[in-house]
């Protein structure tokens, strides 16, 4: 399928005599074309170069382009440059549509090569007519790919969320859809939180091209995955072996770059404002589909741990999240012990951090003082204040365990 897109993009480049770039509707790169050796200067446009190298446009560039209504456009349109957003050369956008839905965009650098191209009547110039016809063929392919991805995503979601009595049916349907890959080594990736459209729970729009490039066998949004009711993305990744999760980590890295990863920017924020950060988690790789619900639980826990403890992420594996393997399984309202609640007040943030670092260092005062960058006597003073606030004895193993787990759990609640 990737080769078909490349061929069609090359057709557009040849028809118009300029390099063309194809992105999905989330601005993930699908294919790009060049035209001859004389176009080196065109190809060095910084936005195009960044898109090709990083396989995605920046938030500022997306905001500038979307402000011109490209998602609603029915015909080619010109977009002027905006140096503030890093767009130094204007663009001609050919919306890639099918069935009334935009599935992506073909971008052309608008310089002297296309200065006389009349966009008012798409078929007046035969070059543009050919480019539009080819763009329509791309739209049909992307729509078919999106439908196939949506069907696989629905089957994956059915398996991960099914009641016990229905799990076997869901597993059988997904096995039939995936074919031989269903019995091979697989990993589940969770990206949390994940933004869905109005009423949307499937993968359409989450980047079908990105999914294909990331080795994703199936992908879906799973509403209500997080304690606050937010959705997370589930991505099923094919592996070469259960002992080699590198493809899953690579897929997680790519998916985290999607504009749907994270929470939306606050209402009223300027266009291009970064959304709340997302994190990704990997469950223990399995062979076959039998244990995917358990792998999904692990992946979600790892994603929540990565969001709570940034040293673990932004991509964390279940095997590496330590105490969060237990804490993520607790109900949020049960994770805070009353004795430690005074320490969690905002006025005592420094004391809470001191206690957590001290306990992370296994109660070794020298290591803790060095990690905090304070004198050892200052550390002892702060620990005394912690004991006064909580009534806990930091020389007692069970009290230390209680305080340590409560401090770690508070990170999960803050996220």
Image (spheres, rainbow, N blue to C red):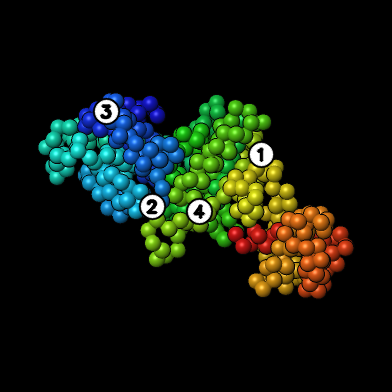
Please state the horizontal and vertical placement of residue 225, each as a whole percent of the image: 57, 53
Q: Are marks 4 and 2 in contact (CB under 8 Å)?
A: no
Say which of marks 4 and 2 sits in front.
Answer: 2
In terms of sequence position, does the residue under pointer 4 or pointer 2 come before the other? 2
Measure the C-alpha gap from mark 4 to mark 2: 17 Å
Specify the label residue 38 is tagged with: 3
In terms of sequence position, does the residue under pointer 1 or pointer 2 come before the other? 2
Q: Determine crowd level at label 2: few under 14, some 14-19, many 20+ residues with C-alpha closer than 10 A.
A: some
Pointer 1 residue: 284
Measure the C-alpha gap from mark 1 to mark 3: 50 Å
Q: Residue furthest right?
A: 396
Q: Are marks 3 and 2 in contact (CB under 8 Å)?
A: no
In terms of sequence position, does the residue under pointer 1 or pointer 3 come before the other? 3
Q: Are marks 4 and 1 in contact (CB under 8 Å)?
A: no
Q: For numbered disc 1, what is the local secondary structure?
A: loop
Q: For numbered disc 4, what is the local secondary structure?
A: loop
Q: For numbered disc 2, what is the local secondary structure?
A: helix
Q: Are marks 1 and 3 in contact (CB under 8 Å)?
A: no
Pointer 4 residue: 262
Q: Determine crowd level at label 4: few under 14, some 14-19, many 20+ residues with C-alpha closer than 10 A.
A: many
Say which of marks 4 and 1 sits in front.
Answer: 4
Q: For numbered disc 3, what is the local secondary structure?
A: helix
Measure the C-alpha gap from mark 4 to mark 3: 41 Å
Please state the horizontal and vertical placement of residue 277, each as a whole percent of the image: 53, 54
Q: Quadrant of residue 347?
A: bottom right
Please state the horizontal and vertical placement of residue 195, each as a whole percent of the image: 47, 53
Q: How many marks?
A: 4
Pointer 2 residue: 60
In terms of sequence position, does the residue under pointer 4 or pointer 3 come before the other? 3
């Amino acid at each position: 399928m990737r080769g078909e897109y490349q061929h069609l993009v090359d057709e557009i480049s040849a028809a118009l005599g300029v390099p063309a770039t194809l992105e999905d509707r989330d601005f993930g790169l699908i294919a790009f074309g060049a035209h001859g050796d004389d176009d080196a200067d065109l190809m060095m446009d910084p936005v195009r170069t960044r898109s090709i190298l990083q396989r995605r446009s920046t938030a500022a560039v997306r905001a500038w382009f979307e402000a011109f209504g490209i998602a609603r456009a029915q015909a080619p349109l010109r977009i002027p440059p905006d140096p503030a957003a890093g767009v130094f050369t204007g663009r001609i956008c050919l919306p890639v549509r099918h069935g009334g839905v935009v599935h992506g965009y073909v971008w052309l650098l608008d310089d002297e090569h296309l200065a006389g191209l009349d966009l008012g009547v798409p078929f007046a110039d035969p070059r543009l007519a050919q480019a539009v016809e080819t763009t329509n063929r791309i739209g049909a392919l992307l729509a078919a790919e999106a439908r196939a991805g949506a069907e696989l995503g629905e089957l994956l979601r059915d398996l991960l969320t099914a009641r016990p009595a229905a799990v076997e049916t869901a597993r059988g349907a997904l096995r039939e859809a995936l074919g031989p890959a269903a019995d091979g080594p697989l990993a589940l990736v969770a990206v949390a939180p994940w933004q869905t459209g109005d009423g949307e729970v499937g993968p359409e729009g989450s980047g079908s091209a990105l999914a294909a490039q990331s080795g994703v066998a199936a992908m879906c949004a799973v509403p209500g995955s997080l304690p606050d009711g937010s959705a997370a993305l589930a991505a099923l990744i094919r592996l070469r072996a259960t002992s080699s999760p590198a493809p899953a980590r690579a897929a997680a890295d790519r998916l985290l770059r999607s504009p749907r990863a994270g929470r939306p920017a606050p209402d009223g924020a300027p266009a291009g404002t970064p959304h709340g950060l997302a994190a990704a988690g990997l469950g223990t790789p399995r062979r076959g589909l039998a244990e995917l619900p358990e792998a999904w639980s692990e992946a979600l826990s790892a994603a929540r741990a990565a969001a709570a403890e940034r040293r673990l992420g932004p991509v964390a594996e279940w095997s590496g999240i330590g105490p969060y393997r237990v804490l993520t399984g607790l109900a949020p309202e049960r994770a805070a012990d009353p004795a430690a609640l005074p320490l969690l007040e905002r006025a005592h943030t420094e004391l809470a951090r001191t206690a957590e670092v001290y306990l992370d260092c296994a109660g070794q005062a020298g290591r803790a003082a060095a990690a905090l960058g304070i004198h050892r006597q200052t550390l002892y003073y702060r620990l005394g204040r912690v004991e006064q606030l909580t009534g806990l004895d930091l020389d007692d193993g069970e009290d230390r365990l209680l305080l340590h787990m409560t401090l770690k759990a508070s990170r999960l609640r803050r996220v």
